[in-house]
Image (tube, rainbow, N blue to C red):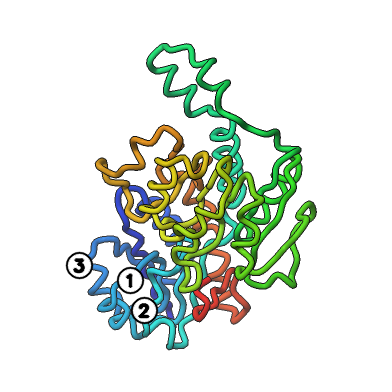
Amino acid sequence: MRLRIVAAVNDPPVWVLPRHEIERIASALPEADVVDARDPELRKEELPRADVLLITKLTVEEARLAARVRWIQSTAVGIGPLLRPEIVQGGIVVTNVRGVHAPFIAEHAIALALAVRRSLHVSAARQRDREWAQSEIEAIPASPAGESRMLVVGLGAIGSRVARMAAGLGFEVHAIRRRPELGGPEGVVRVVGPDRLLDELPEAEVVVLATPTTTDTRIMIGRTELAAMRKTAVLVNVARGRLVDEAALVDALERRQIAGAGLDAFVEEPLPREHALWGLPNVLMSPHSAAFGRDYWRPVIDLFLDNFRRFVRGETLLNVVDKANGY
């Protein structure tokens, strides 16, 4: 029986699977029927006939239509937009691209942390105005990495890489993970559970969020957590915007309750032009671009092709998601 692969990744402006990658799938898998269903109306027509879905999100209606689907490959790490009741409760296997872009995202997290701590965003802003900001930057305190603690929240592929890189720079690295008994990579001094977040925040000069959004982690950084952080601390988010209460963060940054933030993920994307974060001088933002490097899509499709061959042979797939936990 020929399997029908429905490729329906279409989340403009950036997260749209290129046509040439769909053609590459078809060329690599002549034994399957590959359908380009990026158009929303065509997707609805094709979902009832799909055996395999290549997609990043499903509406409630679409999940009900996908009654024949046996496996869903997400082209993202976060699979929250796919976890409709029919998907969670059914026998459908869900896989993601965990680890595929970890090197780029980890480097981005470290870059944001160092840039904000070294006031490079201030230098860049003054450079545009041809202003010599030496006195301004001299007044902004920053301790060296060797005298600073970094708290990494989440020790998956990205968080573990951030932790190793930070330790290499001299940071004392502490980490939080759901199962602290698993420990952490070399260089991590201490690993604790999420229930110890408020104990760890007061001692951290840098807090890096590298954890998925789940019921347990949604708004894990709110007013209470921000109030617990040092006035010299920097918050870095390269995970998901919904991990942070943005209104509380704006307030904390405006009042200099924390020193600054490096942000690559937001609740609403693209970030609305009127959002207060745009105008804050102690914020460095990137447009959810941490995963970008040489080629975002090629390694994603390479993983899918590998998984498809495993699927056909009845082997264990790579990056199977625990649907109950959401990652």
Residue named by callout 3: 41
Residue in the picture at 38% in, 15% down: 129
Between 276 and 92, which is closer to the camera in this rendering?
A: 276
Residue 6 percent across, percent down from the top left: 36, 69
Q: CA distance from mark 2 to mark 3?
A: 20 Å
Amino acid type at mark 1? Leu
Is any part of residue 47 visible from this angle? yes
Q: CA distance from mark 1 to mark 2?
A: 8 Å
Residue 302 percent across, percent down from the top left: 54, 57
Between 207 and 241, which is closer to the camera in this rendering?
A: 207
Relative to 75, say whether 139 is above or below. above
Residue named by callout 1: 58
Q: Are marks 1 and 2 in contact (CB under 8 Å)?
A: yes
Relative to 66, say whether 156 is above or below. above
The mark nearer the N terminus, 2 or 3, is 3
Amino acid type at mark 3? Glu
The mark nearer the N terminus, 3 or 1, is 3
Tell me how many marks there are.
3
Q: Of discs 1 and 2, which sits in the foreground?
A: 2
Residue named by callout 2: 84
Q: Of discs 3 and 1, which sits in the foreground?
A: 1
Residue 189 percent across, percent down from the top left: 78, 55
